[in-house]
Image (cartoon, coloured by chain):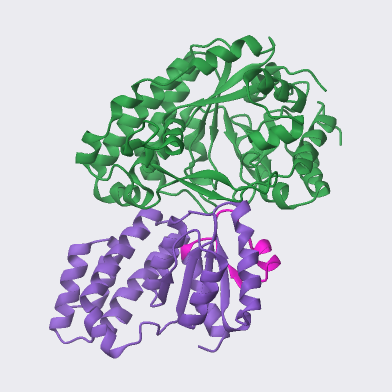
């Protein structure tokens, strides 16, 4: 197994030519990690062991509003969270995993009406509860990190927490009918999340920041680029400016077809774009469009990883190594993450093929 | 008044204007079915085209659908007397078991109702038996299945086999949609069609019923 080395991730993100190997990039579900390691991965020492064994150069840690609200939903009102925070997400139990016959929980956001549907509810929301986030995990993990490994710290969005707090339908209609509420929501959520980011950049073992914020679906952006330019991109730019001032690259995750806003993403100052969803965007065309301006991450089709054969997964990896990796500026991974419904054999097929054939210069 | 102005009010998402024009039309003695067919439905057709061309996005479509719904409430009492609500066709819609994704399905429902279909919305996390029972009771023309996740979209297979087991497969057309879906998956499970977005779902539904000779 090659040695973990965050410098190859940094080099790819900074578009500084080809590193020694094509870096891997994914967020991996706990059940997949457990199957991979043959034992549960329950603490930071074991997380680092997994990352090293699987071929990653970093550990991911996310802090922010959405993480807080998900936890609130799972703990519930009886566990100490108010109904205003514990009901932003609903918990659904069903059979989602290929690793167990038992049902598991997933948290789902309100797509109808949420907790903040008016200016009055905005004023009454317990915003002060979000003033203090727990950064102790970032402090704890440092002792387990090998010197060449870093943390990619996650901020969980600007756009997404706004609609999750409002409910998606209320958010969409408010964009057109209640712009004052939308403006205040983005200002409040943006400020909270930017403060989190500022704290994240103060740790010297953080090697990059990542923001997860879906603004598109298969066909196009969810809302008009005009609305995104008014409310979302200014915050993405503030985050990118913060990262730049701390000499940290910024990765932006959004599913869907981003073709209409690629230039906005680049202009905001993002270094890497994830995951270039194959059913929405062609990564080869995208690379030509953004050449020299944006690193690309991900793209190995999640549907094939979930339902395809190992040979099909390997073929996708080989194709990307041949056609996307040369010249650098690419990190290979799935087209979303590695959730609990990805069989281990397919996850390994992706990783092992990339590790075996991803040495630069690529000659396949 | 001109019914094209009513269409325009729907496109613009102007509730006040749409309601006023609807009442004016009724006062002028224009039949409710004509107000619907030549005023409201054409408005939503334009909305659908604007969505497909990338001019309208989810907020604009939702707002127009809301305007149409409110105008329909005004003409509903009169409409029910002269026109079958399932004139265009009857559609049963739902998100499959384990999946709580709502908004995509709701957009499709809004567009289908805007096009004159009658839609029975079963909501989210719907078990296969409920789909089958509702299709049977309602004598539905089309069943629409939605899912967000790759893992929950696999539950669509169970719905298809349940339809077959109940002897209903040939009685109903099945269309599928959702972020993880594709035509390839639709073909794999034996669905009759896949729509990538809400406007596409309306075109698909219309073409499905044309094939059935309706």
Image point (55%, 70%), residue name: B129
Q: Which chain is green?
A: A
Residue A55: x and y in percent read 75, 26
Q: Is residue B186 magenta?
A: yes
Q: Report whether residue A189 is seen.
A: yes
Q: Which chain is purple?
A: B
| Quadrant of residue A336 within the rendered picture | top right
Residue B70: x and y in percent read 24, 68
In the image shown, does A302 or B59 lie closer to the viewer? Answer: A302
For the record, the magenta segment spans B179-198
In this image, B201 relative to A69: left or right? Answer: right
Image point (58%, 12%), residue name: A205
| Quadrant of residue B111 within the rendered picture | bottom left
Quadrant containing the N terminus of chain B in the rendered view: bottom left
**Which residue is outermost to the right?**
A364
Residue B139: x and y in percent read 49, 83
In this image, A210 relative to A146: left or right? Answer: left
Q: Report whether residue A326 is seen.
A: no
| Quadrant of residue B34 within the rendered picture | bottom left
Rendered view: A132 above or below B146: above
In this image, B158 relative to B114: left or right? Answer: right
Residue A308: x and y in percent read 76, 52
Image point (47%, 43%), residue name: A215
Image point (47%, 75%), residue name: B91
In this image, B191 relative to A179: left or right? Answer: right
Query: How many numbered markers are drawn?
Result: 0
**Which residue is outermost to the front?**
A78
């Amino acid at each position: 197994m090659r040695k973990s080395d965050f410098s190859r991730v940094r080099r790819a993100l900074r578009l500084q030519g080809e590193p020694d190997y094509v870096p891997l990039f994914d967020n991996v579900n706990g059940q997949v990690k457990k199957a991979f390691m043959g034992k549960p991965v329950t603490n930071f020492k074991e997380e680092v062991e997994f990352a090293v064994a699987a071929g990653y150069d970093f550990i991911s840690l996310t802090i922010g509003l959405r993480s807080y609200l998900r936890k609130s939903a799972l703990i519930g009102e009886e566990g100490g969270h108010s109904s205003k925070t514990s009901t932003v997400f609903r918990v659904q139990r069903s059979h989602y995993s290929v690793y167990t016959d038992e049902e598991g929980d997933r948290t789902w956001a309100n797509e109808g009406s949420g907790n903040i549907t008016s200016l009055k509810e905005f004023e009454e929301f317990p915003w002060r509860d979000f003033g203090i986030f727990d950064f102790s995990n970032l402090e704890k993990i440092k002792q387990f990190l090998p010197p060449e490994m870093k943390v990619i710290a996650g901020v969980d969005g600007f756009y997404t927490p706004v609609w999750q707090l409002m409910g998606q339908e209320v958010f969409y209609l408010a964009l057109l009918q209640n712009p004052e509420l939308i403006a205040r929501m983005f200002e409040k959520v943006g400020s909270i999340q930017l403060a989190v980011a500022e704290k994240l950049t103060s740790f010297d073992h953080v090697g990059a920041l990542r923001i997860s914020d879906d603004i598109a679906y298969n066909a196009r952006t969810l809302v008009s680029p005009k609305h995104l330019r008014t409310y979302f991109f200014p915050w993405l730019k503030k985050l990118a400016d913060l990262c730049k001032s701390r000499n940290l690259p910024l990765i932006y995750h959004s599913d869907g077809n981003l073709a209409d806003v690629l230039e906005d993403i680049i202009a905001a100052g993002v270094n890497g774009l994830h995951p270039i969803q194959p059913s929405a965007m062609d990564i080869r065309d995208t690379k030509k469009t953004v050449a020299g301006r944006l690193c690309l991450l991900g793209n190995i089709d999640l549907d094939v990883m979930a339902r395809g054969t190992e040979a099909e997964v390997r073929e996708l990896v080989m194709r990307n190594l041949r056609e996307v990796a040369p010249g650098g500026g690419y990190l290979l991974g799935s087209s979303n993450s590695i959730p609990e419904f990805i069989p281990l054999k397919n996850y390994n097929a992706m990783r092992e093929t990339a590790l075996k054939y991803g040495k630069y210069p690529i000659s396949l | 008044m001109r019914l094209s102005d009513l269409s325009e009010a729907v496109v613009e998402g102007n509730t006040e204007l749409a309601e006023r024009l609807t009442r004016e039309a009724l006062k002028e003695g224009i039949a409710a079915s004509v107000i619907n067919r030549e005023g409201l439905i054409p408005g939503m057709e334009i909305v659908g085209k604007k969505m497909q061309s990338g001019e309208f996005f989810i907020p604009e479509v939702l707002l127009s659908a809301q305007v149409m719904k409110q105008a329909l409430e005004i003409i509903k009492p009169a409409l029910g007397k002269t026109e079958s609500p399932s004139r265009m066709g009857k559609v049963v819609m739902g998100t499959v078991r384990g999946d709580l994704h709502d908004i995509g399905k709701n957009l499709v429902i809004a567009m289908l109702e805007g096009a004159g279909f009658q839609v029975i919305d079963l909501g989210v996390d719907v078990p296969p038996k409920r789909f089958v029972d509702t299709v049977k009771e309602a004598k539905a023309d089309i069943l629409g299945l939605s899912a967000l996740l790759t893992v929950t979209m696999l539950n669509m297979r169970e719905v298809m086999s349940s339809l077959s087991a109940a002897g209903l497969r040939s009685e109903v057309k099945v269309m599928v949609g959702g972020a993880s879906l594709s035509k390839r998956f639709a073909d794999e499970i034996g669905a009759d069609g896949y729509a990538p977005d809400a406007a596409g779902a309306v075109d698909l539904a219309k073409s499905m019923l044309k094939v059935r000779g309706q």
